[in-house]
Image (cartoon, grey):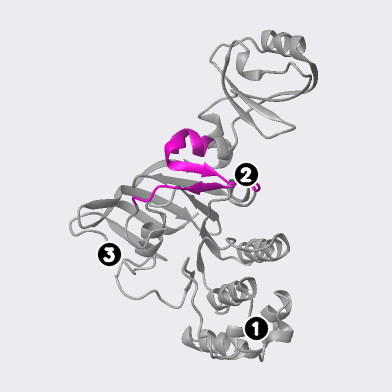
Amino acid sequence: MANVVEIERVSKTFGAHLAVDDLTLDVPEGAIYGFIGPNGSGKTTTLRMIMRIYHPDGGTGHVRVLGEESYQAANDRIGYLPEERGLYKKMKVFDVLRFYAELKGRRDYKQAVNTWLERMQLTDWANKKVETLSKGMAQKVQFISAVIAEPALVILDEPFTGLDPVNADVLRQAVLDLRQRGSTVIFSTHDMSVAEKMCDFIFMIFKGQKVLDGTLESIQQQYGQDILRVCVDGNGYAPHTIVGVEKVTDFGHVQELRIAPDTDTQDLLAQLMQQGRVTHFELARPSLHDIFVRIAGPEALKIDAETGDVISTDDDEEPDDA
């Protein structure tokens, strides 16, 4: 399988800040490739080097995209949804999409625009000005603008942020259909459950360096089965007191217990049964969420109590990298 993106030993600095440090990465054709990492870790800088918005530092390696290494504005075979959303607010929705289609060289835009508007449930807004749209509607319009020309490579920077569950589902299905039609999709996300469910490959960058790269299964295999998912009914239930448990992540009804190496799970079960009625006991590999937190560390993160998403609180970010 050919690689759509090949990054070899690339670094990027902003003043004294090293945003990307000696990065090597291959993105195979036809894949959905997820970029994860805390804010300021280098995700957006890497995406912008792929887009040729940023150049790698002089003397470092190369970035080859769709077989080309020349550094110029992204060509018509690439669609890009930036994290900083921006549309021409005074233009009508249909006219905005026609503009982006023609900008990418697509003249037979009318049917494509109407099809996408219908799919995104925006048909009734085709002749409305962009400024009248809700944030979620505007985000869907910008997504359409990125894919209207049927690009070979689609780069989406935090595409699901701010969308309600219904619109997020619509967008997720659209991304999957792009892959089905032959496009390669790279997207960054803070939602670990989305990365787990959608991505063929997952790449994590932390402090400018690659720390994970592979399928979810291969990444989880690196950590082994050291998670117990349990449900225990009992007033005396106190998982922190159980011998062999290194960390407890409480989700309310379910707790995830990270266990020490060589711990006897039957002994743990016996201890749990002494504290209450065990209704669920499952030995599992760590989730991507758990692996993310292990690498990034609690000092750089907070967890959204409602969604469980990882949100960075580290203010030391490279310029323009969110």
Determine the CA span between mark 2 and mark 1. Answer: 40 Å
- Taking 309 as reference, is 71 above or below it? below
**Nearer to us in this view, 26 or 48:** 48
- Taking 299 as reference, is 58 above or below it? below
Q: Earlier in the sequence, mark 3 or mark 1?
A: 3
Q: Which residue is mark 1?
A: 112
Highlighted range, magenta? 291-316
Q: Secondary structure at mark 3?
A: loop
**Amino acid marked by disc 1:** Ala
Q: Which label sits on residue 305?
A: 2
**Amino acid marked by disc 2:** Ala
Residue furthest toward the front? 235
Q: Which residue is mark 3?
A: 55
Q: Is residue 224 left or right of residue 67?
A: right
Q: Quadrant of the C terminus?
A: bottom left
**Nearer to us in this view, 246 or 209:** 246
